[in-house]
Image: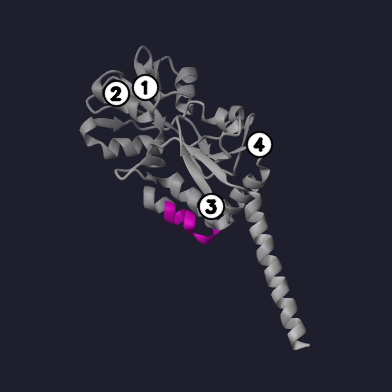
Amino acid sequence: MKKFYGLMILVLIAGAVLSACAEQEDLGPVVIGLNAEYPPFENVDEDGNLVGFDVDLMTAIAEEAGFEFEWVNTRWDGIFVALASGEFDAVISAATITDERAETVDFSDPYFDAGQVIVVRADETDIAGPDDLTGKSAGVQLGTTGDIWLSEETDAEVVRYDENTLAFQALSNGDVDAAVADSPTAAEIVKANPEMELKLLPGVYTNEQYGIAVNKERTDLLEAINEGLAAIRENGTYDEIYDKYFGTD
């Protein structure tokens, strides 16, 4: 009888392992897109490696949820169209959850709070807020929520760039009068590039939440991502990643 029960236990364990493997295999080769031009969330380091908050977060979520994935670094413009068409299974790239985007893709539970801020040159005295952008030029990354806010909520001349960093470089060069971006990214660029001589104005002008965008046909992947995100919030991994990039304040 002992041998019988021992055999039954082995069979049950083997079945559980096979079931877990089957669940992991059902997700298939997961392809995740991002635009690595948005530090500290995603960028390419000096060695050519993808680094940043989103990179670490997605890695932790996938490990916890038990699936493997590969990165595809792509342009921001058109990234949601590519996701909806099946070029990617998911996108994590400091992407704000919006009703318009949710018409074509699904979003995970929110994982980060952010908002739009204004950056100017350090010697700027005429621009202190959105009202002062009237008649001024403001640089922004094409197709972002910053682009939408500038276009709909200010009277600035909106100058669009393919990459967020190009808008800040244009500001530093004097090609535009201001730049707009998500608060953590704007703060990181100003801090990491003192030679640009820029300053972050006080005030956050939108309330936004980032989510991981998922192809609408991949409900299995969406469920796995949400479960992984909940798990790393519960076990403290999320806090460790957050502290690594943003500190404890």
Percent across and percent down for residue 128 are 33, 24
Residue drawn at x 43%, y 51% is 242
Percent across and percent down for residue 237 are 48, 57
Instruction: Tell me which numbered mark, 2 or 4, is placed earlier along the sequence.
Output: 2
Disc nearest the viewer among 2 and 3: 3
Q: CA distance from mark 2 to mark 4?
A: 38 Å
SS class of the residue under badge 1? strand
Instruction: Tell me which numbered mark, 4 or 1, is placed earlier along the sequence.
Output: 1
Residue with the mark numbered 2: 171
Residue with the mark numbered 4: 216
Q: CA distance from mark 2 to mark 1?
A: 7 Å
Q: Which mark is residue 139?
A: 1
SS class of the residue under badge 2? helix
Residue 201 sits inside the magenta stretch: no
Amino acid marked by disc 3: Ile
Q: In the picture shown, does residue 87 fall above or below 134?
A: below
- Say few, some or many: other residues with alpha carbon within 10 Å of mark 2 (under 14 / 14 to 19 / 20 or more): many
Mark yes or no: residue 248 visible.
no
Magenta residue span: 233-241
- Say few, some or many: other residues with alpha carbon within 10 Å of mark 3 (under 14 / 14 to 19 / 20 or more): many
Amino acid marked by disc 2: Leu
Residue drawn at x 49%, y 28% is 145
Rendering colour mode: one colour
Residue drawn at x 59%, y 44% is 109
Q: CA distance from mark 4 to mark 1?
A: 32 Å
Q: Is residue 110 left or right of residue 19?
A: left
Q: CA distance from mark 3 to mark 1?
A: 34 Å
Amino acid marked by disc 1: Gly
Residue with the mark numbered 3: 61
Percent across and percent down for residue 107 are 60, 39
- Contact, CB < 8 Å: mark 2 with mark 1? yes
Amino acid marked by disc 4: Lys
